[in-house]
Each structure stands twice: as C-alpha cells, then as structure tokens.
Image: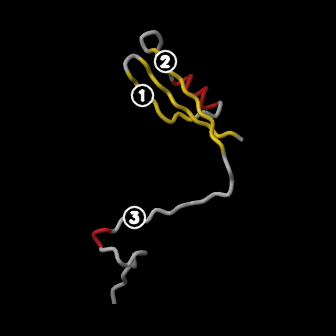
Amino acid sequence: MEKQLMHPNPNTSDQDLSPIVPVVYEDQEYHLEYKYIRQNLDEEEALGEKRLNELADEGWELVSVFNKDAFAHYYFKRLVS
C-alpha cells in the first residue's frame, strides 16, 4: 500500500501545490535602530573592511548597499535592548 501525503487544502490540485512555510511567533518584543551612510565616491573611498568591522563591533549589521551616480548608500540595522 502506497502512502499519500495530504495537503491542508484538499480542494487544491497537485499542480497548485506550493510549499508550506512555517510561521514562528515570538512573545518577546524587540526594536531595531537604523543607520544610513551616504558617501560621495568622487571625493572619498567606499567603506573598507576595517570601518565595516568597526560598525559591526558596535552592533550594526549591513543590510543593503547600492551605488547611484557618484554616491554609495549604506543601510545598517541593529537590535535595541
């Protein structure tokens, strides 16, 4: 006898199946703080490894960086206790 898995919605065809993503809820409330750095790359070099590590030591996590025209835009976040 072959074992069959049941989809939570029995009215869904096999072609419509998508992965079921678990959701985790936490009781703890947390707050994030954000930092934005903009640099003119015509006048100064992009943030180097040393400066990024200094920011990381302060708790900042690099979330995004992009260049537009002559500017580099850095977005950081960190957990506020």
Q: Is residue 37 left or right of residue 7?
A: right
Q: Distance between the residues labelled 3 and 2?
A: 42 Å
Residue 27 x %, y %: 67, 57
The residue shown at (48%, 12%) is: 44
Residue located beneath label 1 in the image = 66
Identify the residue shown where x is 34% and y is 74%: 12
Query: 62 and 54: which one is in front?
Result: 62
In the drawing, does residue 72 fall left or right of residue 59? left
Residue 2 falls left or right of residue 66: left
The local secondary structure at tag 3 comes to: loop
Disc 2 residue type? Gln
Could you tell me how many numbered marks the image carries? 3
SS for dot 1? strand
Q: Mark 2 points at which residue?
A: 39
What kind of residue is marked 3? Pro
Q: On the image, which quarter does residue 18 sit in?
A: bottom left
Quarter of the picture containing the C terminus is top right
Q: Which residue lies furthest to the bottom in this view?
A: 1
Q: Quadrant of the N terminus?
A: bottom left
- Dot 3 corresponds to which residue? 19
Element under disc 2? strand
Of callouts 3 and 2, which one flags the residue occurring earlier in the amino acid sequence?
Answer: 3
Above or below: residue 5 compared with residue 48: below
